[in-house]
Amino acid sequence: MVRRTTIALAVLGALAGCGSDKSKPPDATQVRPSGGNVAVKVPDAGVSFKAPAAWRRQKGKAPLVYAVQTGQATLALWRYPRTEQLPVTHKALQAAKEALVAQIRKRDPTFKVTKAKLLHVGPKRAVQVLGTGAIAGNRRTIRSTHIYTEKAEFVVDAYAPPTVFDRVDTQVFAPVLDSLQIAKPRE
């Protein structure tokens, strides 16, 4: 009898605690701060960069090189080998920018370009498009940077909900892009 009473009290004690925890479960949509940096090297793609330590990090399968993500914010690095002449002159980069914007609008007619520009990522020439579009039906601010070097087009796609993009861009996306180094892939 004492044993049954003890077991019953233990079960009642456990049940009494159910539902009384006022803390909220973790929000899967929350965009976490970087939590410092961790060095990422992918020699077979010829890239290295500093990724946010507090975000999920995962090496991809070609053409995806690597992805980092937290909540609804993602940065993906792609490598597309190219056999054609890469754009290197100002005129060729302008044409690449116009073609890129046209391609984006074709894929997503709702995409609104905020800015499209030519730039350098380190010493490498690049085209960058910033705007708002749909990813899986959700509105996202998207920064797509296309770097032309080493017989490939490297693409850094960074996107997050418009309400948090500026913060995430300042804290994570821009520093990752600034840390990106591209070399000849190890074969």
Image (cartoon, rainbow, N blue to C red):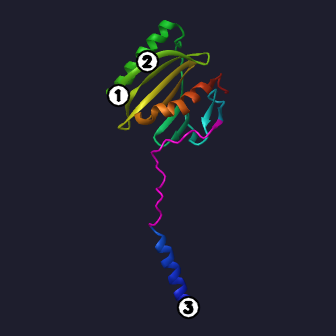
> Mark 3: few, some, or many residues within 10 Å (few <14, many ≥20)?
few
Marked residue nearer the N-terminal end (1 or 3): 3
Label 3 with label 2: CB-CB less than 8 Å:
no
* Lateral position of residue 103 relative to residue 12, left or right: left
Q: Which residue is mark 2?
A: 116
Q: Which residue is mark 3?
A: 2
Q: Looking at the picture, how far across and down is residue 138, in whole percent?
A: 37, 38
Marked residue nearer the N-terminal end (3 or 2): 3
In this orientation, which residue lies closer to the viewer: 176 or 148? Answer: 176
Residue type indicated by callout 3? Val
State the image quarter where residue 186 is shown. top right
Span of residues in magenta: 19-38
In this orientation, which residue lies closer to the viewer: 150 or 94? Answer: 94
Q: Which residue is mark 1?
A: 108
- Examine the structure image and report whether residue 82 is included in the region drawn in magenta: no
Residue found 46% across the figure and 16% down from its top? 117
Secondary structure beneath disc 1? loop
In the picture as drawn, the residue positioned furthest to the bottom comes out as 1
Residue type indicated by callout 1? Asp
Residue found 45% across the figure and 33% down from its top? 165
Secondary structure beneath disc 3? helix
In this orientation, does residue 63 appear? Answer: no
Q: Looking at the picture, how far across and down is residue 168, in whole percent?
A: 50, 34
Q: CA distance from mark 1 to mark 3?
A: 70 Å
Which quarter shows the C terminus? top right
